[in-house]
Amino acid sequence: MRTDLGDGWSIDLPPGDGTLTTSRLTWRCATADSILTTLAGEVPPGATGRTSESGRGGVGVRAAWFYPGRLLGYHFIDGDCLETDLAGPDPTWTVTAWRSVRWLRPAPDRSPTADDHRRSPPRR
């Protein structure tokens, strides 16, 4: 079920055991390589891997650092970044949740609804 995270952000948490914590960052959009380089010095030590990919569903770029039982994810749009801290015993759960993050530009007079997230956002 898609969960509204506020300000146009949403996530579809798959069934299973896992937890989600989010925070917002101000960010200037950049390439996936420059994001990985910049964040590498800011994420907690001990990551077992990292990745980035082009986003979809309104997200420009997404990046993730993998830790035992945890995925620290970043989702970027122009000037904004959503940080997701996904924890659970199943790595498939954390990756599926990380990839499900969407952003839909809210209309000036209302917040996005679950129905909005089912439709494709307008192309930029």
Image (cartoon, rainbow, N blue to C red):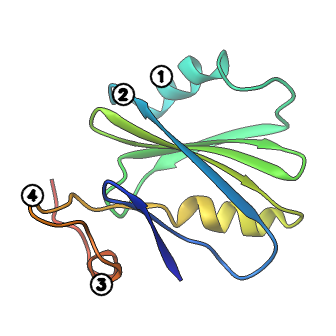
Instruction: Look at label 4 and name its amino acid.
Output: Pro
Residue on which the image places disc 2 = 30
- x and y percentages locating residue 70 in the rendered image: 80, 49
Disc number placed over residue 24 in the picture, else none: none
Classify mark 2: helix, strand or loop.
loop
Residue on which the image places disc 4 = 108
Q: Nearer the viewer, residue 106 or 90?
A: 106
Instruction: Look at label 2 and name its amino acid.
Output: Ala
Could you give the CA–CA distance between mark 1 and mark 3, rounded to whole angstroms? 34 Å
Instruction: Look at label 3 and name its amino acid.
Output: Asp
Mark 1 vs 2: CB contact within 8 A: yes
Could you give the CA–CA distance between mark 3 and mark 4, rounded to whole angstroms? 17 Å
Task: Tell me if 100 is positioned left or right of 81 in this view.
Answer: right
Could you give the CA–CA distance between mark 1 and mark 2, rounded to whole angstroms? 6 Å
Task: Tell me if 97 is positioned left or right of 78 in this view.
Answer: right
Counting residues from the N terminus, which is met first, the one under dot 2 or under dot 3? 2
Q: Nearer the viewer, residue 36 or 93?
A: 93
Disc number placed over residue 115 in the picture, else none: 3
Give the residue displayed 36% in from the left and 27% down from the top: 30
Residue on which the image places disc 1 = 34
Instruction: Look at label 1 and name its amino acid.
Output: Ser
